[in-house]
Amino acid sequence: MNIKDLPRNPVAVTIKMIGCRWKIMIIADLLNGTKRFSEIKKSLRGITQKVLTSKLRELEQDGILMREEVGTKVEYTLTDIGYSLRPVILSFYDWGKDYKKYVKLTDGLAG
């Protein structure tokens, strides 16, 4: 990634790097530690092998995770900059949890 390729606005930079739902889910999954491709695919129900491969490559190119071949297996681990996304991902988690509570509370009021 070249600095010239990044947006001027820092929020836009973050969205560019992790704005895809699958990238966020991959990062969240790897916050728990190193995983193999098949383990990530199993955790992320609904993702195709093609999309997972593509998103892992993008995250690797952007320095968010590293890929390591261990014998015949491939493992993925977050880099330090990838782990620095922990508070961002946890805030997504907390907000999603709170929003689900809000919807549950207001769902009965709408009818």
Image (cartoon, helix red, strand yellow):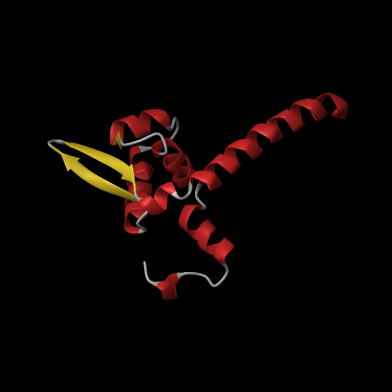
Name, please, the residue furthest toward the bottom.
4
Name, please, the residue furthest toward the left.
71
- Up/down of 73 relative to 66, above or below: above
Residue drawn at (50%, 49%) of the image? 20
The quadrant of the rendering that contains the N terminus is bottom left
Please state if 67 lies on the left or on the right of 108 as rendered.
left
Residue drawn at (47%, 69%) of the image? 6
> Where does residue 100 sit, x and y in percent of width and height?
69, 31
Residue drawn at (53%, 57%) of the image? 15
Please state if 101 lies on the left or on the right of 10 as rendered.
right
- Up/down of 105 relative to 22, above or below: above
> Where does residue 73 sit, x and y in percent of width and height?
18, 35
Q: In this rendering, does residue 111 appear at all? A: no
How many circles with numbers are drawn on the protein?
A: 0
Q: In this rendering, does residue 108 appear at all? A: yes
Please state if 5 lies on the left or on the right of 76 as rendered.
right
Identify the image quadrant of residue 102: top right
Residue drawn at (37%, 71%) of the image? 2
> Where does residue 104 sit, x and y in percent of width and height?
75, 26
> Where does residue 107 sit, x and y in percent of width and height?
80, 27
- Up/down of 71 relative to 63, above or below: above
The quadrant of the rendering that contains the C terminus is top right
